[in-house]
């Protein structure tokens, strides 16, 4: 598991770094003002539907059923199922795209009721351009599911890198040609770039699918048992995986009433937090889902429980120190990344506060992905659905409380999302414990050592930042880069050293993987693989 997660994590890291580069371009050219609010809102609508229908509900249900079909009936039957699902998906998402283009103005008014008429009009235009993005990303998600089921994780995980490359190269290139002053025309060009990137994310996986013998020709059989099972799983899966995206959409509704910049601040902060979510939560759940689907077929649930425990322990070993580091280094990190061009110091301060609030829920965001995958492997889809609905309701109430009662502003929206994610993870884990058993004694002991190692790391990073203050290191780009580089680098090394001293098995496993990649001896402990 650690080796596969490392491979997927590396591919996702490249993609997330390119995504961050895309946001750096946006921050420099557009800042956190009206134009950027319009783009983020327009992109959020198709991106939410993509996450729910394509990479969320349909993809998760498809992988679960596809793995079982392939194990029981062989590759030929699995290929037929893939053709049926692709045909169904293209028809479904094509209809969604047409409806989205026709009703874009009404949707924008629903999710951004606080926008002025001019912002609403531009957002609707951008929404119409971006809506076909759903279709391309839906096809890319199914391609990823097929490749993952065949044990090929690297290429699908890196496919989103081509989305970001397309967005940057095509979008920025068109903007420089048609609107070098980066006005409304330039933001339209960036939307065209994002659409091009979505196409590339699907197209880059086609050769690998063809090499495995997959020719996605239209097929239609509503009586196919696998297709019907996927349809049965999709409805609760749709709700079960929707909480984070719907909560982000709810935040947009609240933020649209906070004036220019609020939507953008939330988006920039969430972009940073997406890096560890993708590296850890998405990578671990992506690797674990096919194996969990196979383990769930056995009568003995102990191997299933152990695999879930290992996934959650690895998740905690990575996410807890990452959350601490992001919170402590939030101000210099945001400043070093974005504070240039039209993104000023006030934008930095607000975005850093939001990032701290998001970091609080990092373990929750990532753990939910692993836990939901476990429930779907067990064919228990109702529990994630109910928890997701409760999470959405809790987010609305917490948003109202933090924004209108405590006056926390945009940071209150991020805090509400984090608390909701932590609560969802806790409930899902409690219910799963009743089904297959909870953490072993070794698991709880490992969690305690993870927390201790993270605490040691946090104190060291705080001390390094204090040294920077005493040395009167300037707060410009060079000073902030120094804080991030030395503070973050030292934090990683100290956490690794502390975990090694504490004999944390996840750290030993990661060390074995790194040694094997570097061609070194692997005799550094009995870490779990």
Image (cartoon, rainbow, N blue to C red):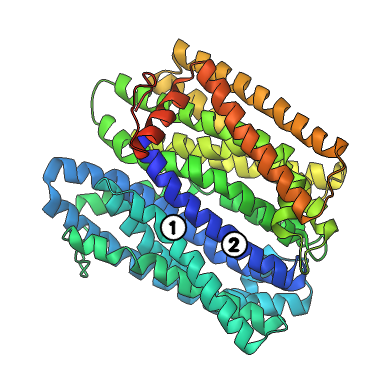
- Residue in the foreground of this view, choosing between 478 and 504: 478
In the rendered view, tell whether residue 419 sits above or below residue 410. Answer: above
Residue 164 pos. (x, y %): 51, 65
- Left or right of 83 on screen, residue 477: right
Q: Who's the residue at 48% across and 71% down the image?
A: 166
Foreground: disc 2 or disc 1: 2
In the rendered view, tell whether residue 224 sits above or below residue 449. Answer: below
In the rendered view, tell whether residue 204 sits above or below residue 479. Answer: below
- Residue in the foreground of this view, choosing between 185 and 424: 185
Point out the image quarter for the C terminus.
top left
- Residue in the foreground of this view, choosing between 8 and 66: 8
Point out the image quarter for the N terminus.
top left
- Residue in the foreground of this view, choosing between 282 and 88: 282
Residue 97 pos. (x, y %): 47, 73
- Judge the density around disc 2: few (<14), some (14-19), many (≥20) Cα neighbours within 10 Å: some
Q: How far is disc 2 from disc 1 in space, using C-alphas? A: 27 Å
- Judge the density around disc 1: few (<14), some (14-19), many (≥20) Cα neighbours within 10 Å: many
Q: Quadrant of residue 489?
A: top right
What residue sits right under mark 2 in the picture? Answer: 21
Residue 209 pos. (x, y %): 24, 61
Q: Which mark is residue 53?
A: 1
- Left or right of 7 on screen, residue 400: right
> Who comes first in sequence, dot 2 or dot 1?
2
Q: Who's the residue at 24% across and 58% down the image?
A: 82
Q: Which mark is residue 347?
A: none
Is residue 64 in view from this perspective?
Answer: yes
Q: Who's the residue at 36% across and 55% down the image?
A: 156
């Amino acid at each position: 598991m650690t080796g596969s997660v490392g491979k997927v994590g590396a591919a996702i890291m490249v993609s997330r770094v390119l995504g961050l580069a895309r946001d750096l371009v946006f921050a420099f050219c557009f800042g956190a003002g009206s134009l950027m609010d319009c783009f983020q809102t327009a992109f959020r609508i198709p991106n939410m539907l993509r996450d729910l229908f394509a990479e969320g509900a349909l993809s998760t249900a498809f992988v679960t059923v596809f793995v079982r079909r392939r194990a029981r009936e062989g590759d030929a039957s699995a290929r037929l199922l893939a053709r049926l699902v692709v045909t169904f998906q293209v028809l479904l998402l094509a209809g969604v795209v047409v409806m989205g283009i026709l009703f874009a103005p009404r949707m924008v008014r629903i999710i951004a009721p606080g926008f002025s008429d001019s912002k609403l009009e531009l957002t609707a235009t951008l929404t119409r351009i971006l809506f076909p993005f759903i279709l391309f990303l839906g096809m890319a998600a199914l391609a990823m599911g097929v490749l993952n089921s065949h044990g090929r994780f690297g290429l699908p995980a890196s496919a989103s890198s081509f989305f970001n490359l397309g967005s940057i190269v095509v979008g920025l290139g068109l903007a420089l040609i048609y609107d070098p002053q980066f006005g409304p025309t330039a933001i339209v060009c960036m939307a065209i770039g994002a659409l091009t990137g979505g196409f590339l994310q699907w197209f880059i996986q086609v050769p690998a699918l063809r090499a495995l013998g997959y020719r996605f020709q239209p097929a239609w059989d509503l009586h196919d048992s696998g297709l019907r099972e996927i349809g049965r799983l999709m409805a609760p899966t749709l709700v079960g995986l929707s909480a984070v995206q719907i909560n982000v959409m709810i935040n947009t509704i609240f933020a649209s009433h906070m004036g220019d910049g609020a939507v953008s601040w939330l988006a920039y902060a969430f972009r940073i937090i997406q890096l560890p979510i993708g590296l850890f939560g998405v990578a671990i759940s992506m690797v674990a889902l096919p194996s969990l689907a196979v383990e769930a077929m056995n009568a003995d649930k102990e191997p299933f429980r152990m695999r879930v425990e290992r996934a959650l322990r690895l998740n905690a070993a990575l996410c807890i120190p990452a959350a601490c580091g992001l919170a402590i280094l939030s101000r210099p990190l945001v400043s070093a990344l974005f504070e240039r061009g039209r993104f000023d110091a006030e934008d930095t301060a607000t975005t850093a506060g939001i990032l701290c609030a998001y970091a609080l829920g990092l373990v929750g965001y990532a753990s939910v992905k692993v836990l939901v995958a476990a429930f779907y492997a067990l064919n228990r889809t109702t529990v994630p659905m109910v928890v997701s609905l409760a999470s959405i309701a809790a987010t609305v109430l917490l948003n109202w409380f933090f924004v209108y009662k405590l006056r926390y502003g945009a940071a209150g929206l991020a805090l509400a999302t984090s608390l909701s994610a932590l609560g969802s993870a806790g409930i899902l884990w409690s219910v799963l414990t009743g089904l297959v058993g909870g953490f072993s004694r070794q698991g709880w002991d490992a969690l305690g050592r993870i927390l201790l190692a993270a605490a040691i790391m946090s104190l060291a990073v705080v001390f390094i930042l204090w040294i920077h203050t005493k040395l009167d290191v300037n707060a410009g780009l060079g000073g902030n880069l120094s804080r991030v580089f030395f503070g973050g680098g030292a934090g990683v090394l100290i956490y690794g050293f502390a975990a090694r001293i504490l004999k944390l098995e996840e750290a030993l496993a990661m060390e074995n993987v790194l040694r094997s990649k570097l061609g070194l001896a692997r005799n550094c402990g009995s870490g779990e693989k």
